[in-house]
Image (tube, helix red, strand yellow):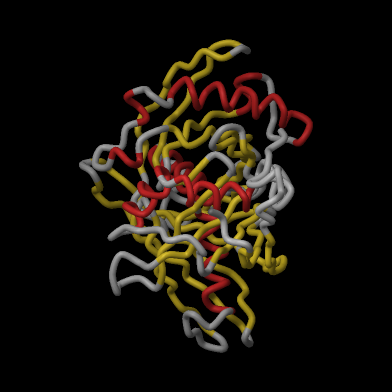
Amino acid sequence: MLPSTIRTTDFHTGGEPFRIVAEPPVAIPGATVAERRARAIEDPEIQALRAVLCSEPRGHADMYGGFVVPPNDAGAHLGVLFWHKDGFSTACGHGTIALGVWAVDSGRVAAPHTGSVAVVIDVPSGRVTARVHRQDGRVTSVDFVNVPSWVIAREVAVTTSRGEVSATVAYGGAIYATLPAAQLGLSVTPGHLGELITLGREIKWALNDSPHAVHPDDPRLDGIYGTIWFDELGDVPGQVHQRNVAVFADGEVDRSPCGSGTCARLAVLADEGRLPPGSVLRHDSVVGSTFIGSVLETVDAAGRRSVIPQVTGMAYRTGEHLFSVDPHDPLVPGFVLR
Protein backbone atom coordinates (compact mmCIF):
# COMPACT_ATOMS: atom_id res chain seq x y z
CA MET A 1 0.00 0.00 0.00
CA LEU A 2 1.58 3.28 -1.13
CA PRO A 3 1.48 6.24 1.27
CA SER A 4 -0.85 9.09 0.37
CA THR A 5 1.98 11.65 0.35
CA ILE A 6 5.72 11.49 -0.34
CA ARG A 7 8.07 14.39 0.39
CA THR A 8 11.23 14.89 -1.66
CA THR A 9 14.01 17.43 -2.21
CA ASP A 10 15.30 17.54 -5.77
CA PHE A 11 18.76 18.44 -7.06
CA HIS A 12 20.65 18.23 -10.30
CA THR A 13 24.35 17.48 -10.63
CA GLY A 14 25.74 18.43 -14.01
CA GLY A 15 22.22 18.26 -15.40
CA GLU A 16 21.40 14.80 -14.02
CA PRO A 17 18.45 14.73 -11.58
CA PHE A 18 18.69 13.40 -8.05
CA ARG A 19 15.50 13.15 -6.00
CA ILE A 20 16.20 12.77 -2.28
CA VAL A 21 13.67 11.07 0.01
CA ALA A 22 15.02 11.97 3.44
CA GLU A 23 12.37 10.01 5.33
CA PRO A 24 11.12 7.09 3.23
CA PRO A 25 7.49 6.41 4.18
CA VAL A 26 8.01 2.65 3.74
CA ALA A 27 10.17 0.51 6.03
CA ILE A 28 13.44 -0.62 4.43
CA PRO A 29 14.92 -3.27 6.76
CA GLY A 30 18.50 -4.49 6.90
CA ALA A 31 21.65 -4.36 9.00
CA THR A 32 23.73 -2.68 6.26
CA VAL A 33 23.04 -0.54 3.22
CA ALA A 34 23.98 -3.43 0.92
CA GLU A 35 21.53 -5.66 2.77
CA ARG A 36 18.80 -3.01 2.56
CA ARG A 37 19.32 -2.82 -1.21
CA ALA A 38 18.96 -6.60 -1.51
CA ARG A 39 15.76 -6.47 0.54
CA ALA A 40 14.41 -3.53 -1.47
CA ILE A 41 14.88 -5.40 -4.73
CA GLU A 42 12.63 -8.20 -3.42
CA ASP A 43 10.05 -6.03 -1.63
CA PRO A 44 7.00 -5.06 -3.75
CA GLU A 45 6.11 -2.15 -1.45
CA ILE A 46 9.57 -0.56 -1.71
CA GLN A 47 9.63 -1.17 -5.46
CA ALA A 48 6.24 0.54 -5.78
CA LEU A 49 7.57 3.58 -3.88
CA ARG A 50 10.55 3.74 -6.23
CA ALA A 51 8.33 3.35 -9.28
CA VAL A 52 5.88 6.07 -8.30
CA LEU A 53 8.73 8.59 -7.90
CA CYS A 54 10.55 7.88 -11.16
CA SER A 55 7.63 7.02 -13.45
CA GLU A 56 5.41 9.50 -15.22
CA PRO A 57 3.53 11.63 -14.31
CA ARG A 58 5.77 12.32 -11.27
CA GLY A 59 9.04 11.41 -12.96
CA HIS A 60 10.30 10.32 -16.36
CA ALA A 61 12.31 7.58 -18.09
CA ASP A 62 15.64 9.09 -16.99
CA MET A 63 14.72 10.00 -13.42
CA TYR A 64 17.16 9.19 -10.62
CA GLY A 65 17.03 9.46 -6.84
CA GLY A 66 17.75 7.92 -3.48
CA PHE A 67 16.20 6.84 -0.20
CA VAL A 68 18.18 8.06 2.82
CA VAL A 69 18.66 5.17 5.28
CA PRO A 70 20.76 4.65 8.41
CA PRO A 71 24.50 4.11 7.85
CA ASN A 72 26.20 0.80 8.52
CA ASP A 73 27.73 2.17 11.72
CA ALA A 74 28.64 5.38 13.50
CA GLY A 75 31.56 5.97 11.13
CA ALA A 76 29.25 7.46 8.47
CA HIS A 77 26.72 10.27 8.57
CA LEU A 78 24.06 8.51 6.51
CA GLY A 79 23.32 5.70 4.11
CA VAL A 80 21.49 5.77 0.80
CA LEU A 81 19.76 3.43 -1.62
CA PHE A 82 20.13 4.74 -5.18
CA TRP A 83 17.29 4.08 -7.62
CA HIS A 84 16.22 4.62 -11.22
CA LYS A 85 13.38 3.49 -13.46
CA ASP A 86 14.66 -0.10 -13.64
CA GLY A 87 15.65 -0.71 -10.03
CA PHE A 88 18.34 -0.04 -7.43
CA SER A 89 21.96 0.70 -8.40
CA THR A 90 25.13 -0.09 -6.46
CA ALA A 91 26.82 3.32 -6.76
CA CYS A 92 26.13 6.87 -7.87
CA GLY A 93 28.70 9.66 -7.92
CA HIS A 94 26.38 12.45 -9.03
CA GLY A 95 23.96 11.43 -6.27
CA THR A 96 26.74 11.42 -3.69
CA ILE A 97 27.68 14.96 -4.71
CA ALA A 98 24.04 16.05 -4.36
CA LEU A 99 23.75 14.35 -0.97
CA GLY A 100 26.83 16.23 0.22
CA VAL A 101 25.27 19.57 -0.68
CA TRP A 102 21.93 18.55 0.83
CA ALA A 103 23.50 17.31 4.08
CA VAL A 104 25.37 20.58 4.62
CA ASP A 105 22.63 22.96 3.45
CA SER A 106 19.99 21.19 5.55
CA GLY A 107 22.19 21.30 8.65
CA ARG A 108 22.35 17.54 8.92
CA VAL A 109 26.16 17.82 8.84
CA ALA A 110 27.72 20.92 10.43
CA ALA A 111 30.10 22.79 8.13
CA PRO A 112 32.31 25.88 8.49
CA HIS A 113 31.11 29.16 7.00
CA THR A 114 34.23 29.07 4.84
CA GLY A 115 36.14 25.83 4.57
CA SER A 116 35.47 22.13 3.97
CA VAL A 117 33.75 19.22 5.65
CA ALA A 118 33.65 15.51 4.82
CA VAL A 119 30.17 13.98 4.55
CA VAL A 120 30.66 10.22 4.89
CA ILE A 121 28.04 8.07 3.20
CA ASP A 122 27.46 4.32 3.13
CA VAL A 123 26.30 3.13 -0.30
CA PRO A 124 25.75 -0.45 -1.53
CA SER A 125 29.28 -0.66 -2.98
CA GLY A 126 30.98 0.58 0.19
CA ARG A 127 31.80 3.75 2.11
CA VAL A 128 32.34 6.94 0.12
CA THR A 129 32.97 10.58 0.97
CA ALA A 130 31.52 13.84 -0.30
CA ARG A 131 34.07 16.51 0.62
CA VAL A 132 31.97 19.69 0.62
CA HIS A 133 33.67 23.07 0.12
CA ARG A 134 32.01 26.31 1.24
CA GLN A 135 32.82 29.97 0.74
CA ASP A 136 30.95 32.63 2.75
CA GLY A 137 28.22 30.16 3.66
CA ARG A 138 27.64 28.85 0.13
CA VAL A 139 28.66 25.45 -1.18
CA THR A 140 30.96 25.99 -4.15
CA SER A 141 32.07 22.45 -5.05
CA VAL A 142 32.08 18.85 -3.86
CA ASP A 143 34.77 16.18 -4.18
CA PHE A 144 33.35 12.67 -4.46
CA VAL A 145 35.94 10.19 -3.17
CA ASN A 146 34.96 6.71 -4.27
CA VAL A 147 35.75 3.11 -3.41
CA PRO A 148 38.81 1.46 -5.04
CA SER A 149 38.35 1.19 -8.81
CA TRP A 150 40.12 -1.02 -11.33
CA VAL A 151 40.24 -2.38 -14.86
CA ILE A 152 38.58 -5.79 -15.17
CA ALA A 153 39.33 -6.67 -18.80
CA ARG A 154 40.60 -5.07 -22.00
CA GLU A 155 39.83 -5.70 -25.66
CA VAL A 156 36.62 -7.56 -24.96
CA ALA A 157 34.95 -8.35 -28.29
CA VAL A 158 31.21 -7.62 -28.47
CA THR A 159 28.95 -8.18 -31.45
CA THR A 160 26.42 -5.40 -32.07
CA SER A 161 23.88 -4.69 -34.79
CA ARG A 162 26.49 -2.35 -36.32
CA GLY A 163 29.33 -4.87 -36.21
CA GLU A 164 31.91 -6.05 -33.72
CA VAL A 165 33.44 -3.62 -31.21
CA SER A 166 36.20 -3.88 -28.61
CA ALA A 167 35.42 -2.67 -25.10
CA THR A 168 37.29 -2.19 -21.85
CA VAL A 169 35.42 -3.29 -18.73
CA ALA A 170 36.16 -1.43 -15.50
CA TYR A 171 34.77 -1.11 -11.99
CA GLY A 172 34.08 2.22 -10.29
CA GLY A 173 31.51 1.17 -7.68
CA ALA A 174 29.56 -0.32 -10.57
CA ILE A 175 30.82 -2.25 -13.59
CA TYR A 176 30.95 -0.45 -16.94
CA ALA A 177 31.85 -1.35 -20.51
CA THR A 178 33.74 1.62 -21.98
CA LEU A 179 34.69 2.32 -25.59
CA PRO A 180 35.20 5.22 -28.02
CA ALA A 181 32.13 6.18 -30.01
CA ALA A 182 34.40 6.56 -33.04
CA GLN A 183 34.68 2.75 -33.23
CA LEU A 184 31.25 2.80 -34.87
CA GLY A 185 31.61 6.12 -36.67
CA LEU A 186 29.66 7.99 -33.99
CA SER A 187 30.35 10.84 -31.60
CA VAL A 188 29.04 11.77 -28.18
CA THR A 189 26.59 14.40 -29.37
CA PRO A 190 22.82 14.78 -29.03
CA GLY A 191 22.45 13.99 -32.74
CA HIS A 192 23.86 10.50 -32.23
CA LEU A 193 22.18 9.86 -28.88
CA GLY A 194 19.50 7.50 -30.21
CA GLU A 195 22.12 5.25 -31.81
CA LEU A 196 24.32 5.38 -28.71
CA ILE A 197 21.38 4.30 -26.53
CA THR A 198 20.48 1.38 -28.80
CA LEU A 199 24.05 0.15 -29.14
CA GLY A 200 24.85 0.83 -25.48
CA ARG A 201 21.97 -1.42 -24.45
CA GLU A 202 23.18 -4.13 -26.81
CA ILE A 203 26.69 -4.04 -25.32
CA LYS A 204 25.43 -4.01 -21.74
CA TRP A 205 23.20 -7.03 -22.18
CA ALA A 206 25.78 -8.91 -24.26
CA LEU A 207 28.29 -8.67 -21.40
CA ASN A 208 25.96 -8.67 -18.40
CA ASP A 209 26.19 -12.41 -17.71
CA SER A 210 29.80 -12.81 -18.87
CA PRO A 211 32.81 -13.54 -16.61
CA HIS A 212 33.82 -9.89 -17.10
CA ALA A 213 30.74 -8.76 -15.14
CA VAL A 214 31.63 -10.58 -11.92
CA HIS A 215 32.78 -8.72 -8.81
CA PRO A 216 35.58 -10.68 -7.07
CA ASP A 217 34.21 -10.27 -3.53
CA ASP A 218 30.49 -9.50 -3.57
CA PRO A 219 28.03 -11.10 -6.02
CA ARG A 220 25.51 -8.36 -5.21
CA LEU A 221 27.77 -6.07 -7.27
CA ASP A 222 27.81 -8.36 -10.32
CA GLY A 223 26.48 -7.28 -13.72
CA ILE A 224 27.25 -4.57 -16.26
CA TYR A 225 25.59 -1.40 -15.01
CA GLY A 226 26.07 0.56 -18.22
CA THR A 227 28.03 1.38 -21.34
CA ILE A 228 30.22 4.49 -21.44
CA TRP A 229 30.84 6.00 -24.87
CA PHE A 230 33.62 8.57 -25.04
CA ASP A 231 35.23 11.00 -27.47
CA GLU A 232 38.87 12.07 -27.27
CA LEU A 233 39.05 15.87 -27.18
CA GLY A 234 42.83 16.26 -27.02
CA ASP A 235 45.33 15.91 -24.19
CA VAL A 236 47.41 18.82 -22.93
CA PRO A 237 50.14 18.72 -20.29
CA GLY A 238 48.50 17.75 -17.01
CA GLN A 239 45.07 17.06 -18.51
CA VAL A 240 43.25 14.38 -20.44
CA HIS A 241 40.12 15.79 -22.05
CA GLN A 242 37.22 13.52 -22.99
CA ARG A 243 33.49 13.79 -23.54
CA ASN A 244 31.29 10.87 -22.52
CA VAL A 245 27.78 9.61 -22.13
CA ALA A 246 26.79 6.71 -19.90
CA VAL A 247 23.87 4.58 -21.09
CA PHE A 248 22.96 2.73 -17.92
CA ALA A 249 20.29 0.42 -16.50
CA ASP A 250 18.07 -0.44 -19.48
CA GLY A 251 18.68 2.52 -21.75
CA GLU A 252 18.75 5.43 -19.31
CA VAL A 253 21.00 8.35 -20.24
CA ASP A 254 23.16 10.18 -17.71
CA ARG A 255 23.05 13.91 -18.40
CA SER A 256 26.07 14.47 -16.18
CA PRO A 257 29.56 13.13 -16.95
CA CYS A 258 28.59 10.21 -14.62
CA GLY A 259 30.33 10.08 -11.26
CA SER A 260 30.94 6.34 -10.84
CA GLY A 261 31.53 6.11 -14.60
CA THR A 262 34.21 8.79 -14.34
CA CYS A 263 35.85 6.67 -11.64
CA ALA A 264 35.85 3.68 -14.00
CA ARG A 265 37.40 5.84 -16.72
CA LEU A 266 40.05 7.10 -14.27
CA ALA A 267 40.99 3.50 -13.55
CA VAL A 268 41.34 2.82 -17.27
CA LEU A 269 43.39 5.94 -17.97
CA ALA A 270 45.65 5.34 -14.99
CA ASP A 271 46.22 1.79 -16.17
CA GLU A 272 47.21 3.18 -19.58
CA GLY A 273 49.73 5.55 -17.99
CA ARG A 274 47.84 8.61 -19.19
CA LEU A 275 47.35 10.12 -15.71
CA PRO A 276 50.76 10.75 -14.16
CA PRO A 277 50.84 12.36 -10.70
CA GLY A 278 49.36 15.85 -10.72
CA SER A 279 47.29 15.32 -13.86
CA VAL A 280 43.51 15.33 -14.17
CA LEU A 281 40.73 14.10 -16.40
CA ARG A 282 38.41 16.80 -17.69
CA HIS A 283 35.26 14.79 -18.30
CA ASP A 284 32.53 16.57 -20.25
CA SER A 285 28.95 15.33 -20.65
CA VAL A 286 26.61 15.13 -23.61
CA VAL A 287 24.89 18.33 -22.36
CA GLY A 288 28.13 20.27 -21.83
CA SER A 289 28.60 19.96 -18.06
CA THR A 290 31.98 18.96 -16.63
CA PHE A 291 33.50 16.86 -13.84
CA ILE A 292 37.19 16.98 -12.94
CA GLY A 293 38.62 13.58 -12.06
CA SER A 294 41.91 12.67 -10.43
CA VAL A 295 43.64 9.70 -8.84
CA LEU A 296 44.38 10.21 -5.15
CA GLU A 297 46.45 7.07 -4.68
CA THR A 298 47.11 3.60 -5.98
CA VAL A 299 46.17 0.68 -3.72
CA ASP A 300 45.75 -3.07 -3.77
CA ALA A 301 42.07 -4.05 -3.65
CA ALA A 302 40.61 -7.48 -4.29
CA GLY A 303 44.10 -8.58 -5.31
CA ARG A 304 44.20 -6.03 -8.12
CA ARG A 305 46.08 -2.81 -8.74
CA SER A 306 43.40 -0.23 -8.08
CA VAL A 307 43.05 3.51 -7.74
CA ILE A 308 41.23 5.70 -5.26
CA PRO A 309 39.43 8.13 -7.57
CA GLN A 310 38.14 11.61 -6.83
CA VAL A 311 35.53 13.39 -8.92
CA THR A 312 34.81 17.08 -8.41
CA GLY A 313 31.51 18.67 -9.38
CA MET A 314 28.60 20.65 -7.99
CA ALA A 315 24.90 20.05 -7.34
CA TYR A 316 22.08 22.58 -7.21
CA ARG A 317 18.68 22.31 -5.60
CA THR A 318 15.84 22.47 -8.11
CA GLY A 319 12.86 22.26 -5.77
CA GLU A 320 10.86 20.42 -3.16
CA HIS A 321 7.84 18.22 -3.72
CA LEU A 322 4.98 16.87 -1.67
CA PHE A 323 3.65 14.24 -4.05
CA SER A 324 0.12 12.95 -3.67
CA VAL A 325 -0.90 9.37 -4.40
CA ASP A 326 -4.62 8.94 -4.97
CA PRO A 327 -5.60 5.31 -4.22
CA HIS A 328 -8.29 5.57 -6.91
CA ASP A 329 -5.85 6.68 -9.63
CA PRO A 330 -5.69 3.86 -12.22
CA LEU A 331 -2.23 4.96 -13.40
CA VAL A 332 -0.48 4.51 -10.04
CA PRO A 333 2.46 3.84 -9.75
CA GLY A 334 2.87 5.34 -13.22
CA PHE A 335 4.28 4.57 -16.62
CA VAL A 336 7.48 5.02 -18.61
CA LEU A 337 7.67 6.23 -22.19
CA ARG A 338 10.97 6.09 -24.05
- 113 or 243, which is in the foreground? 113
Q: Is residue 286 left or right of residue 211?
A: right
Can residue 27 be seen?
A: yes
Q: Residue at x 76, y 36 (%)?
A: 190
Q: Residue furthest front?
A: 328
Measured as percent of width and height from the top left, residue 321 is found at 69, 66
On the image, the x and y values in percent for residue 135 come to: 61, 83
In the displayed structure, 77 sits above or below 67; it is below
Q: Is residue 87 left or right of residue 78?
A: right
Query: Between 77 and 302, which is closer to the camera in this rendering?
Result: 77
- Give above or below for 153 relative to 108: above
* Residue 7 vertical position relative to residue 198 in the rendered view, above or below: below
Q: Is there any visible trace of residue 172 in the rendered image?
A: no
In front here: 7 or 254?
A: 7
Q: Is residue 262 left or right of residue 129?
A: right
Q: Count the marks.
A: 0
Residue at position x 69%, y 61% in the image:
324
Residue at the extreme right of the image, as rendered: 191
User: Furthest-left residue in view?
Assistant: 303
Rendering coords of residue 274 (x, y %): 46, 42
Going 52% across and 57% down the picture, which residue do you hit?
66
Quarter placement of the C terminus:
top right
Query: Which quadrant would residue 129 be assigned to in this image?
Result: bottom left
Where residue 301 sits: x, y (%)?
A: 25, 47
Residue at the location (69% across, 54% down)?
Answer: 15
**Left or right: where 231 falls relative to 81:** right
